Image (cartoon, rainbow, N blue to C red):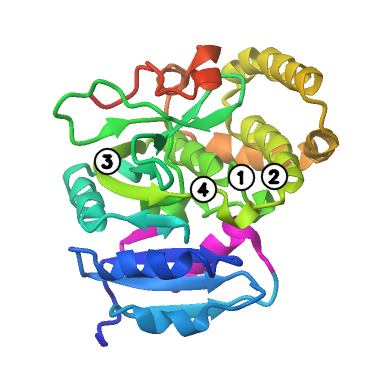
Amino acid sequence: MSTRTSPRVSVVVVSYNSSETLPRCFDCLSAQSYKDFQVILIDNASQVPPGDLVTRLANPVTYLEMKDNLGFAQAMNVGIEASDAPFLVALNPDAFPHPNWLEELVAAADRHNDIAAFGSLQISAADDERIDGYGDHYLISGQAWRGQSRPKSGARRVDCCFGVCAAAALYRTAVLREIGGFDQRFFCFYEDIDVSFRIRLLGHGCAVVPSAVVDHIGGASFVGKSNFAEYLIARNQWWALIRNMPALLLVIALPGFVLIQCMAMIKSPRRARLKGLWEGLRRTGEFLSSRRHIQSRRTVSTPHLARCLSWNPRDFSRKRYPRAKVDLS
């Protein structure tokens, strides 16, 4: 095992009851063409801790076993603190990178110094003809989605997008620290949207690298927990919107947010969703406080951010890559 203490990349894998998918994830990491990385495995109090799996990796491994389930957001912050690398990669245990995945992400980061977050082309592990995620996109009214289509980008090496999905993404570690990392109050869901939003507000770009491919199962840690997921999504949607959206755009966003929430309740009245929305609204003051700090540091103009958003509700309903005018040609 290498004794080098400062590799160029730290790959943070947050595990929670991931024993079925983690071995394959580790095998894919071992097969990477790019070798200058370490793995930081953080286990969130799994019923069967995966510590014995670290021997599957030839690269240096830091294994951190949490006493409680911290959620994805706080566990990622543990990973940020444990890393000395200039690039930090988030990789879900149910995402299986192709051999040149990390090489392509690092090459893109070296080419584009103005971009701070690079996402992957996520292909459904169950159907290699279906796109599971191509960038994170954000509707003006506060709803986010993983794109399930690609733009006609020709020979471009990256496609700009509002944000990146943390299931398989590379970040500049210094920028993550500059924005204060992930917000642990989100636990999971929309925590990567919140991070991407804050990255953009500080003037950095986000993009997807189409040649960096992972096969992704998606939701493997939340099987049988759809009510909890509904609760978190409803709550975190509001938090991400209320603290990050600039004032003028927030005035435009709020009626659409209310309308979409009402339509969702009518179409599928779920107690968990209502409970999550109420919890989000109840704690609005707490996030207005953090809003003041975030907005005081904003460096991008309102028109620039507006061009990074989707204004067409059909983009959200069809989960397509939007035709937003973003900051990279």
In this figure, which residue is indicated by the disc labeled 3? 209
On residue 218, which mark appears? Answer: 4
Circle count: 4
Tell which of 122 and 66 is nearer to you.
122
Q: Earlier in the sequence, mark 4 or mark 1?
A: 1
Q: Quadrant of the C terminus?
A: top left
In this figure, which residue is indicated by the disc labeled 2? 229
On residue 189, which mark appears? Answer: 1
Q: Is residue 44 visible?
A: yes
Kindly report the distance in space between the C-alpha atoms of the residues bearing marks 3 and 1.
Answer: 22 Å
Instruction: From the image, state whether disc 3 or disc 4 is nearer to you.
Output: 4
Kindly report the distance in space between the C-alpha atoms of the residues bearing marks 1 and 2.
Answer: 8 Å
Q: Amino acid at mark 2?
A: Ala
* Residue found at x 74% / y 22%: 264
* Relative vertical location of residue 30 with respect to residue 211 in this rendering, above or below: below
Mark 4 surroundings within 10 Å by alpha-carbon count, few (fewer than 14), some (14 through 19), many (20 or more): some
Q: Position of residue 33 (x, y in %)?
A: 18, 63
Q: Residue 45's quadrant in the figure?
A: bottom right
Mark 1 surroundings within 10 Å by alpha-carbon count, few (fewer than 14), some (14 through 19), many (20 or more): many
Q: Quadrant of the N terminus?
A: bottom left
The extreme left residue here reads: 155
Bounds of the magenta segment: 69-89
Q: Are the residues at dot 3 and dot 2 in contact (C-beta closer than 8 Å)?
A: no
Q: Earlier in the sequence, mark 3 or mark 2?
A: 3
Mark 2 surroundings within 10 Å by alpha-carbon count, few (fewer than 14), some (14 through 19), many (20 or more): some
* Relative vertical location of residue 191 with respect to residue 28 in this rendering, above or below: above
Q: Amino acid at mark 4?
A: Gly
* Residue found at x 47% / y 72%: 41
